[in-house]
């Protein structure tokens, strides 16, 4: 099972996990990213490259499928304006082996941060805005999977 | 050959004030970096957004590429900051 969704709408984590569990592998790992309300942040605006995003996320998922014995992968990434507490991203993996499920899940979220065409803009209570700067640490994590 | 489409994202888009435009196709020997340098000479928001290529990333026909890649017969070049999804 391979599921990639790039959407404005929220998603149902329980339903996503249930679909992975139903594959029968016995092991499901997942990561959910949620907007933090640090420093007076009132919203996160997510922009993406519509003509590229879907294909690029499929490439990342295919890389995971090539590296680990997986029965299923689900990646959901939202765009648009998201408030603190809102879910941004979901990665779920199913396998007969817990190491494969856990490692591929970590790989996928690291690569989503460094190799998927999304940009975050922070909106604060005073009306200020700021584009989030890429973190060298995130890039290093993604590079770590490439060596 | 048809014009080249350039698309902009995030603060590059905001500084330039548009999300895409068509330009005359650069010479076959032109790289993305050459295109960036040419656009930056327009001044204003272009200079602000594109004046420091080290801050930029690029895609050719929806695939990430290094800035020294040749544009060739591509249809679309995208210019943007390092991505921050996930």
Image (cartoon, rainbow, N blue to C red):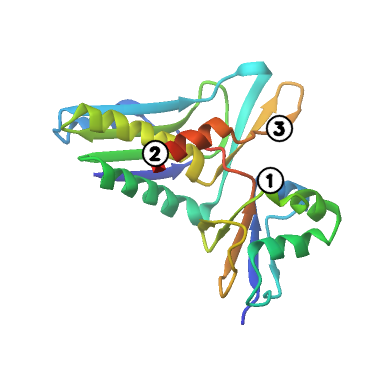
Protein chain holding label 1: B
- Is residue A9 among what the camera can see? no
Q: Identify the residue position indicated by label 3 in the image.
A: A130
Q: Secondary structure at mark 3?
A: strand
Residue A48 percent across, percent down from the top left = 55, 46
Which is more foreground, mark 3 or mark 1?
1
The residue singled out by tag 2 in the image is: A145
Please name whichever residue, A131 or A64, is drawn nearer the observer in this view of the structure: A64
Does residue A84 lie above or below B47 as drawn?
Answer: above
Characterize the local packing of mark 2: few (<14), some (14-19) or many (20 or more) Cα atoms within 10 angstroms. few
Residue B26, picture quadrant? bottom right
Category of crowding for the residue at label 3, using alpha-carbon neighbours closer than 10 angstroms: few (below 14), some (14–19), many (at least 20): few
Q: Nearer the viewer, residue A108 or A2?
A: A108
Where does residue A126 sit, x and y in percent of width and height? 76, 22
Residue furthest front in the image: A147
Q: Which residue is mark 1?
A: B55
Q: How many numbered marks appear? A: 3
Question: Quick one: label 3 or label 2, which is nearer the N terminus?
Answer: 3
Asked if labels 1 and 2 share a chain, the reply is no
Labels 3 and 2 positioned on one and the same chain: yes
Give the residue drawn at x 32%, y 49%.
A62
Q: Nearer the viewer, mark 1 or mark 2?
A: 2
Tell me the quadrant of the picture where the N terminus of chain A can be found. Answer: top left
């Amino acid at each position: 099972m391979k599921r990639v969704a790039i959407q404005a709408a929220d998603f149902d984590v329980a339903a996503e996990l249930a679909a992975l569990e139903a594959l029968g592998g016995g092991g499901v790992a997942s990561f959910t990213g949620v907007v933090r309300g640090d420093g007076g942040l009132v919203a996160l605006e997510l922009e993406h490259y519509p003509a590229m995003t879907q294909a690029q996320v499929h490439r990342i998922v295919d890389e995971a499928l090539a590296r680990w014995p997986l029965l299923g992968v689900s990646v959901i990434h939202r765009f648009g304006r998201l408030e603190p507490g809102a879910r941004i991203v979901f990665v779920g993996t199913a396998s007969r082996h817990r190491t494969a499920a856990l490692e591929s899940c970590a790989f996928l979220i690291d690569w989503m941060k460094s190799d998927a065409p999304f940009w975050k803009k922070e909106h604060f209570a005073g009306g200020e805005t700021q584009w989030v700067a890429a973190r060298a640490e995130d890039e290093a994590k993604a590079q770590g999977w490439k060596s | 050959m048809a014009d080249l489409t350039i698309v902009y994202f995030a603060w590059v888009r905001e500084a330039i004030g548009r999300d895409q435009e068509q330009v005359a196709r650069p010479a076959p020997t032109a790289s993305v970096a050459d295109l960036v340098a040419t656009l930056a000479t327009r001044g204003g928001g272009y200079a602000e957004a594109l004046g420091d290529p080290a801050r930029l990333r690029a895609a050719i026909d929806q695939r990430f590429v290094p800035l020294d890649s040749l544009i060739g017969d591509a249809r679309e070049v995208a210019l943007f900051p390092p991505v921050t999804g996930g």
